[in-house]
Amino acid sequence: MARERMITRTVEFTEAEVMCVNVNTADVAIRHFIVTGTFENSDKLMKALKKTYETDELKLVNLQDSRVTEQLYGMTEEMFIQMATILPPRN
């Protein structure tokens, strides 16, 4: 049986534990968030987290911990062709 051809990609993402406040209930909790990519420092990480996850009700207050993780993703070529967006040729 022939091995099925795969498209693969290793993705780096940053996992963070952040102290959050619910402004309606004043509840404080440490929550787990994930953003793609890596960041030079904690300020840039917090800026990206706030942009993605902060709402009028949930405020991200303080970064408690973070770590960079790599994950290998893949799909068959057939699935890739069905789901991918066709781009203009590279010059």
Image: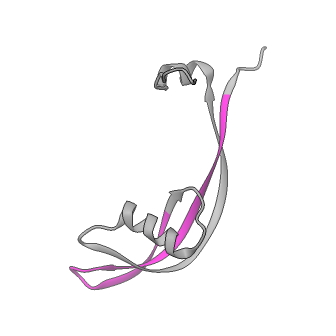
Q: Position of residue 41 (x, y in %)?
A: 58, 73
Of all residues shown, which one is farthest toward the left? 24
Q: Position of residue 78 (x, y in %)?
A: 58, 18
> Which residue: 66% across, 49% down?
71
34 w.r.t. 24: above or below: above
3 w.r.t. 15: above or below: above
Q: Is residue 37 left or right of residue 56?
A: right
Of all residues shown, which one is farthest toward the right? 1
Q: Is residue 32 left or right of residue 53?
A: right
74 w.r.t. 62: above or below: above
> Which residue: 58% across, 23% down?
91
Is 51 in front, or is 60? 51
Whether 65 is among the magenta residues is no
Please report the bounds of the magenta region as a residue range.
Answer: 7-33
Q: Position of residue 20 (x, y in %)?
A: 38, 78
Tally of marks: 0
> Which residue: 33% across, 75% down?
59
